[in-house]
Amino acid sequence: MQGKFITFEGGEGTGKSTQLKLLAEWLRLHGVECVESKEPGGTEVGKDIRRLLVCGDKDKMDPVAEALLYYADRRIHLTQKIWPTLEQGQWLLSDRYADSTTAYQFFGYKQRVRRETLDSLYHLVAGDFKPDLTILLDIDPKIGLERSFAKAGTMSEKETRFESRGLEFHNLLREGFLEIAKSEPQRFVILDANTTIENLHQEIVRVISERFGIK
Ligand code: TMP
């Protein structure tokens, strides 16, 4: 049986990576084998692409070049990790996927990359393949950025290319994610991330149990 592909989306400081890890532990306890991954940088080659994307000056490349690099990373992630994992019957949990490109490179950048360009890149790279479920963690960007900066201070490499953009960018991003989610209500669940780690985890577990019948 094919495994499930679950993606976590949201702006900075929503707690995606913490929640992904907790969900993976919970799934394993319930007999579901799963692989934890992320974009950009879910593969060896992807780690090099990630460095190009998240480090350095915020204006070092234009939005189209940036979108192409995210999609190169995504293609490698799909062919080397996501699809093989699902074919083996394991679940794959990804911290970000294509909705991040639409949110950041389209909505965040005030549509300087055309939506059709991103949609055709998606089709080229993934065909009709889509996540089985996307969990959007929503938070007021003021709170998210505060959390994110506190974390960036402890990172070995300064991955702050996006955090360093202003509040206006992050507000656009949040609206973008919500708009994408509303356009595909079957695939998305939107959860309020302004709560405790444990509360949010329980919400996620409730959604996963209901949707996939895991007890
Ligand atoms: P992360 O910090 O959540 O790992 O993500 C790295 C940064 O890359 C984050 O600021 C969001 C950004 N990003 C995009 O702009 N477009 C994309 O398609 C993806 C996957 C991430």
Image (cartoon, helix red, strand yellow):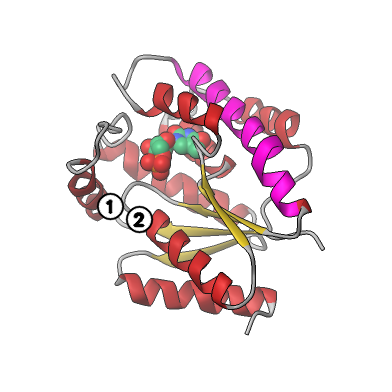
Q: CA distance from mark 1 to mark 2?
A: 6 Å
What residue is rendered at 42% in x and 72% in y? 201
Residue 164 shows up from this direction? yes
Residue 34 spot, x, y in % from top left:
61, 60
Choose the circle earlier in sequence order: 1 or 2.
2
Q: Quadrant of residue 138?
A: bottom left
Q: Residue at x 60, y 28 (%)?
A: 71
Which residue has dot 1 on it? 144
Instruction: State whether the magenta stretch is mostly helix, strand or loop.
Output: helix
Q: Which mark is residue 14?
A: 2
Q: Judging from the image, what secondary structure is the residue with disc 1 in?
A: helix
Q: Position of residue 95 (x, y in %)?
A: 49, 49
Q: Is mark 2 within 8 Å of ligand 1?
A: no
Q: In this rendering, would 97 be left or right of 107?
A: right
Q: Is residue 114 above or below residue 97?
A: above
Residue at screen point 34% across, 58% down? 139
- Left/right placement of residue 83 relative to residue 169 reads right
Q: Quadrant of ligand 1?
A: top left
Q: Which residues are magenta?
A: 62-86
Dot 2: element = loop
The amino acid on which the numbered mark 1 sits, given as a three-letter code, is Gly
Q: Is mark 1 within 8 Å of ligand 1?
A: no
Q: Residue at x 30, y 71 (%)?
A: 195
Does 121 appear above or below 64?
A: below
> How dense is the environment of label 1, judged by Cα within 10 Å: few (below 14), some, or many (20 and up)?
many
Amino acid on which disc 2 is placed: Thr
Judge whether 60 appears above or below 9 on screen: above
Q: Position of residue 84 (x, y in %)?
A: 73, 45
Residue 46 is a magenta residue: no
